[in-house]
Image (tube, rainbow, N blue to C red):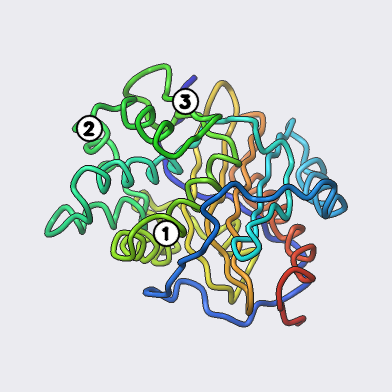
Amino acid sequence: MKVLVGVAALVVAGVLVAVIVLTGGSGGEDWHSGCASAPAEVAGKHANAVAEARNALLSKGNDPLLEIEVVDLDACAVELSWKADQPQPTASVVKLLIALDLIDSSGVPSGSEEKAVHTMLAASDDRVASSLWQQRGGPAIVVRQAKRLGLAHTSPPAEAGQWGSTQMSPEDVVTVYRYITAQLPEEEREFLTEALESAPRNAADGFDQHFGIPRAFPGADWAVKQGWGRSGGRRVLNTTGLVRTASRTFAVAVMGSWNENVDWTTATTALTAATGALKGSLVSGGNWNLG
């Protein structure tokens, strides 16, 4: 199973039921949370929102698959979940594990390495990711981080050089964000989240990575790591990150795939619509101003 190591972003557009009043990508915001333990499960919560998100993908055809996990980091509770324990290729989302592995061994990078890691996360630079992947043992990075963070549905790629084929579930991706926000020391947390907040519209390879979370939640504070690629005859699109409303903070992972004959515009538009469908269900959970 191979994923073309493009890096990137999927997520949802469509009709927005609310407008958040904070500014995205603020750079330097503190994303600290207290959600270190496993979040409480809330059975059946927001089932209509999940159905709407699924319909957003189904309406575009091309055999879509969708997996979702949204956790309220303030309440430390699952807000939305759909097939959240099902692993799929990460594409560039695995760069979170690469960065964490480096920080675990030597702390916050400095000098040219600091700039390189920032670029890997913010602009999703594949060249930096490939270099660090090779230097640090490739698949061993995934094995170490899965053990350290307790990632139950994460595994390294079958072919050692294909880092984008690393498998993770939405539940595990959200666990990574919980670890970053609740367990990392302040300096390390701020280094990572500042890079994720700084994601430019165009990634290092020119791909528009402001779909999904950035496009579905205009005006929100966000810190994202996106992913795109091909795997096993399918296009893979993932939008993941932190989203802050006026009063609550959420960790979000929306992961999708389609038959590879779907075009990128159709896929990213559908996933953005699916992500946007989740927004209304969170209005009651946080102080979202209606536009």
Q: Is residue 1 above or below residue 20?
A: above
Residue neighbourhood size for the residue with mark 3, other residues' Cα within 10 Å, grouped as few (<14), some (14–19), many (≥20): many
Q: How many marks?
A: 3
The mark closer to the camera, 2 or 1, is 2
Q: Secondary structure at mark 1?
A: loop
Residue 115: x, y in percent? 21, 58
Q: Secondary structure at mark 3?
A: loop
Is disc 2 in contact with disc 1, using a CB cutoff of under 8 Å? no
* Label 2 CA crowd tier, 10 Å (few <14, some 14–19, many 20+): few
Q: Which mark is residue 100?
A: none
Residue closest to the far right: 48
**Tag nearer the camera, 1 or 3:** 3
Q: In this figure, which residue is indicated by the disc labeled 1?
A: 202
Q: Characterize the local packing of mark 1: few (<14), some (14-19) or many (20 or more) Cα atoms within 10 angstroms.
A: some
Lower position in the chain sequence, tag 2 or tag 1: 2
Query: What amino acid type is highlighted by mark number 1?
Result: Asn
Q: Is residue 154 left or right of residue 163?
A: right
Instruction: Name the residue at 74% across, 68% down.
Output: 285
Q: Which mark is residue 155?
A: 3
Q: Quadrant of residue 35?
A: bottom right
CB within 8 Å, label 2 to label 3 = no
Instruction: Please tell me which of labels 1 and 3 falls first in the chain.
Output: 3
Q: Earlier in the sequence, mark 2 or mark 3?
A: 2
Q: Residue at x 31, y 26 (%)?
A: 140
Where residue 88 sits, quadrant-wise, is: top right
- In what element is the residue under mark 2? loop
Type of amino acid at the residue the image marks with label 3: Ser
> Residue 136 has which mark?
2
Give the percent coordinates (x, y) of residue 168: 53, 33
Instruction: Using the rendered view, name the quadrant where residue 102 is placed.
Output: top left
